């Protein structure tokens, strides 16, 4: 049977946060309903202004509005000077210092509403570096599956460094969905019969967040959600941590001094914190197994403003109902064993 695939590649600029505007300019990623969006906002007192774009479209839409002392805000969007919708929600700063926006988008008539959820991208470039979002999509009607993959593209740095970052960022995102695609193409008539009875396509969706980026390092978190039958979708995470000075990927072991026993240090802290956070959905043995001092347990990690973030996927340390878990290991707990000298690590 002939396979028809639609592959679209779009580029959406996320923008750059300069050193002089770090307190006022915010780059955010998230969704409106089921659509992924990028947003850049400037907060000047109680005034808000900026743009946002749908990742699948890429055309910027102007935003203007205001925010109150209680964090409640409103934004009006306009296309070609005509109001095309509005955002109403709450501006929140998490314990980790990350701005999140959530609330409701509505069309001009108020007859259609969608929930939105956005998270700040922690970008602190001081030069010309920029990160843009690229999108790959594939829809296969005969085999009843859809694929969406977001990945970042870096520019404004040394060409060789940008080329290596972009190669890694794309290859990690694309290879992650390769097994899903292979399985979908191998579906039999019996498999497809079940999908048709279910009345919905299988899917794989990959998106990313920037947990930290400055002139020395970029730390990316990728999330994947997929469904290919069963009681519920599956999810997992993977990461890319990149040294902008050397032009190479950073492994978690690269951060620490040789023979520092860093896995044991990380494990001890993570196990302690997970026992506090997870109750009936897990037990001590499960946590000890999933967060024990083994390299495979610490394959998904990120750099943040406040520490090293360790990502534990669903089922790794608790039952599915508990969802994925993350533990932020404060830099102060690790400074005695760090081997790298990135500014963010506090050395």
Image (cartoon, rainbow, N blue to C red):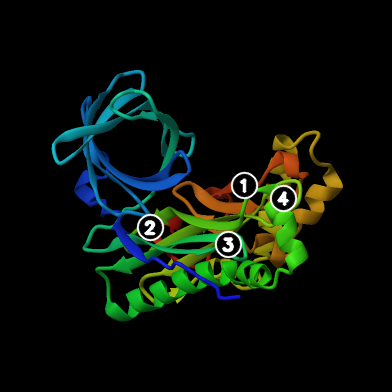
The secondary structure type at the circle numbered 3 is loop
Q: Earlier in the sequence, mark 1 or mark 2?
A: 2
> How far apart are the alpha carbons under marks 4 and 1?
37 Å
Crowdedness near tag 1: few (<14), some (14–19) or many (≥20) residues, C-alpha within 10 Å: some
Residue positioned most to the bottom: 160
Residue 8 image offset from top left, x and y in percent: 39, 65
Task: Tell me if label 1 and label 2 are in contact, CB under 8 Å.
Answer: no
Residue 178 sits above or below residue 329 on the image: below
> How far apart are the alpha carbons under marks 2 and 4?
46 Å
Q: Which residue is mark 1?
A: 326
Q: Residue at x 39, y 59 (%)?
A: 343
Residue 185 as seen in the image, left or right of residue 330: right
Q: Earlier in the sequence, mark 4 or mark 1?
A: 4
Q: Marks 2 and 4: which is nearer the front?
A: 4
Q: Residue at x 76, y 46 (%)?
A: 231
Answer with the quarter of the image where residue 25 lies.
Answer: top left
> How far apart are the alpha carbons under marks 3 and 1?
22 Å
Badge number at residue 36: none
Residue 136 image offset from top left, x and y in percent: 44, 65
Name the image quarter holding the N terminus. Answer: bottom right
Badge number at residue 337: 3
Residue 306 sits above or below residue 255 on the image: above
Q: Which residue is mark 4?
A: 197
Q: Is residue 336 among the parts visible in the rendering?
A: no
Crowdedness near tag 4: few (<14), some (14–19) or many (≥20) residues, C-alpha within 10 Å: few
Crowdedness near tag 2: few (<14), some (14–19) or many (≥20) residues, C-alpha within 10 Å: many
Q: Earlier in the sequence, mark 4 or mark 3?
A: 4
Residue 152 as seen in the image, left or right of residue 148: left
Q: Earlier in the sequence, mark 3 or mark 2?
A: 2
Q: Earlier in the sequence, mark 2 or mark 4?
A: 4
């Amino acid at each position: 049977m002939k396979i028809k695939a639609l592959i679209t590649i779009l580029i959406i600029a996320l923008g750059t946060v300069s050193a002089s505007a770090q307190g006022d300019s915010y780059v955010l990623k998230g969704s409106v309903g089921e659509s992924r969006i990028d947003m850049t906002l400037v907060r000047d007192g109680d005034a808000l202004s900026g743009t946002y774009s749908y990742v699948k479209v890429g055309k910027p839409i102007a935003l203007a509005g205001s925010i109150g002392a209680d964090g409640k805000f409103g934004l009006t969007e306009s296309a070609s000077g005509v109001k095309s919708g509005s955002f109403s929600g709450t501006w929140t700063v998490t314990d980790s210092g990350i701005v999140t926006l959530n609330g409701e988008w509505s069309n001009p008539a108020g007859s259609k509403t969608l929930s939105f959820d956005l998270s700040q991208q922690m970008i602190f470039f001081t030069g010309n570096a920029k990160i843009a979002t690229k999108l790959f999509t594939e829809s296969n009607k005969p085999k009843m599956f859809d694929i969406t993959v977001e990945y970042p593209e870096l520019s404004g740095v040394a060409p060789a460094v940008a080329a290596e970052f972009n190669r890694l960022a794309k290859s990690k995102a694309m290879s992650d969905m390769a097994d899903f695609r292979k399985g979908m193409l191998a579906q039999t008539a019996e498999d497809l019969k079940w999908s048709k009875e279910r009345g919905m396509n299988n899917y794989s969706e990959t998106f990313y967040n920037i947990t930290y980026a400055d002139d020395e390092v970029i730390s990316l978190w990728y999330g994947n959600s997929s469904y290919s039958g069963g009681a519920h979708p599956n999810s997992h995470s993977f990461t890319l941590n990149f040294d902008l000075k050397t032009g190479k990927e950073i492994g978690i072991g690269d951060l620490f001094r040789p023979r520092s026993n860093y896995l044991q240090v990380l494990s001890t802290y993570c196990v302690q914190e997970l026992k506090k956070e997870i109750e009936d959905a897990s037990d001590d043995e499960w946590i000890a197994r999933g967060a024990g001092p083994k390299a495979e347990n610490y394959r998904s990690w990120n750099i943040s403003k406040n520490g090293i973030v360790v990502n534990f996927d669903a089922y790794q340390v608790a039952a599915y109902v508990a969802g994925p878990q993350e533990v932020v290991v404060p830099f102060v707990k690790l400074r005695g064993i760090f081997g790298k000298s990135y500014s963010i690590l506090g050395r």
